[in-house]
Image (spheres, helix red, strand yellow):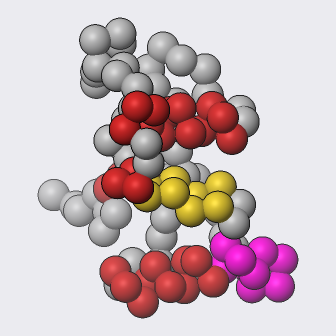
């Protein structure tokens, strides 16, 4: 039996993947993020996925992103140069989607 992938979260069942490459000269900030992530984890890959809660539209604004962040198990949110740690947020802003939408 052949191994599906070193990173199964990004590998389709047919062993393909939809990868995107990042170049230092065209996207220096994201390139630096990937480089630092690799230094910390040993993995040079970040997974890009839909940002929404089931039943809600995909996040389309910083307000949508913050609301989704506060209603999920995400620990941190980065939008542009803004970094948010969930532990440092106002607890009254927490959203509870668990009873509203069926979880996967």
Q: Is residue 68 left or right of residue 39?
A: right
Q: Position of residue 20 (x, y in %)?
A: 65, 62
Image quadrant containing the N terminus:
bottom left
Question: Looking at this rendering, what residue extends furthest in the top direction?
Answer: 100
> Which quadrant of the figure has residue 94?
top left
- Does residue 15 appear anywhere in the picture? no
Give the total number of marks visible in the rendering: 0
Question: Looking at this rendering, what residue extends furthest in the left direction?
Answer: 1
Q: Is residue 66 above or below residue 15?
A: above
Q: Position of residue 26 (x, y in %)?
A: 83, 77
Q: Is residue 92 above or below residue 84?
A: above
- Going 46% across and 79% down the picture, which residue do you hit? 37
- Going 58% across and 77% down the picture, which residue do you hit? 33
| Residue 67 counted in the magenta span | no
Image quadrant containing the C terminus:
top left
Front residue of 99 and 56: 99
- Going 52% across and 44% down the picture, which residue do you hit? 49
Highlighted magenta segment, given as a residue range? 23-31
Q: Is residue 46 above or below residue 29?
A: above
Q: Position of residue 39 (x, y in %)?
A: 42, 89
């Amino acid at each position: 039996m052949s191994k599906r992938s070193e990173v199964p979260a990004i590998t389709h069942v047919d062993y393909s993947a939809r990868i995107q490459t990042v170049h230092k000269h065209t996207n220096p900030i994201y390139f630096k993020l990937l480089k630092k992530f690799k230094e910390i984890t040993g993995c040079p890959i970040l997974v890009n996925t839909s940002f929404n809660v089931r039943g809600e539209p995909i996040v389309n604004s910083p307000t949508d992103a913050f609301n989704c962040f506060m209603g999920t198990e995400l620990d941190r949110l980065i939008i542009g140069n803004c970094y948010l740690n969930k532990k440092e947020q106002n607890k009254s802003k927490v959203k509870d989607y668990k009873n509203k939408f069926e979880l996967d």
